[in-house]
Image: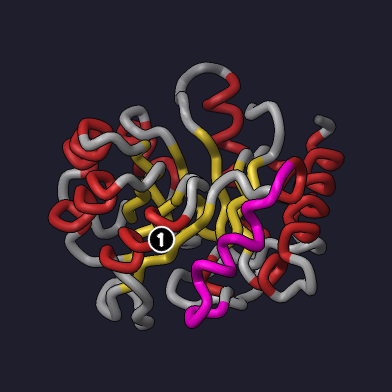
Amino acid sequence: MAHRPLIAPSILSADFARLGAEIEAVAGHGETRADWVHVDVMDAHFVPNLTLGLPVVQSLLKHTDLPLDCHLMIEDPDRWAIGYAEAGAHNVTVHAEAAGDPVKLAKDLRAAGAKAGLSIKPGTPLEDHLDTLKHYDTLLVMSVEPGFGGQSFIADVLEKVRTARRLVDTGHLKLLVEIDGGINADTIEQAAEAGVDCFVAGSAVYGAGDPGKAVAALREQAARAAGR
């Protein structure tokens, strides 16, 4: 398990007119500094919503030295994902339900300089993708249906987290376990207890008066729950 919980604020909940400043708000020092910045890319096809794409990610990369965690909720990631890796994203996550050849895609993402992430929706069984996950650096378990921010946490997905945690701890998989959806002060502890390494938090960070302090508080809560 990662030494300390990673917090990845989701800019889906930030003010899109002030994205640079919103990232700056979680780029402080010490405990108030986010570990990653989570960027939700939606294409209005794989999910009903439309957000931002590669040009915005390229702009953000010039503005911050925080690692960008790009979550591609898009059709045909085999075609589009590599551009995000080549631009300099730290971690590029594609959906298991959308990727045509996820093993090749993982290799291509790594070759382009990024970590490769595989995401599964709440209703997608983890077991169907265990062989594929041997080629990935990150497993992103969705704890809401992808497409919109502000949804309620689906606790049932924690069974998938526990399974992944066991496989990582026994050496069958070598990856970071990430969770995305409804993570806040009320839900982060159960996610941490289940074995999550990296917590994506949107409104829990950007709905707070001080986003940096919210990052620190969430990390401390997760660490306490996980006994770290």
Which quadrant of the figure has residue 47?
bottom left
**x, y percent for residue 112:** 22, 37
**124 or 4, nearer to the observer:** 4
User: For the residue marked with disc 1, what is the amino acid?
Assistant: Leu
Query: Which residue occupies 56% across, 62% down?
Result: 23
- Residue pictured at 27% horizontal, 33% vertical: 110
**Residue 222, magenta (yes or no):** no
Which quadrant is the N terminus positioned in?
Answer: top right
Q: Which residue is mark 1?
A: 60
Please tell me whether residue 121 is drawn above or below residue 108 in the rendered image: below
Label 1 neighbour load within 10 Å: few <14, some 14-19, many 20+: some
Magenta highlight: main SS: helix
In which image quadrant can residue 132 be found? top left
Up the image or down, 219 lies above or below 52; here it is above
**Residue 22 % position (x, y):** 59, 68
Name the element at disc 1.
helix
The stretch of residues the image draws in magenta is 15-29
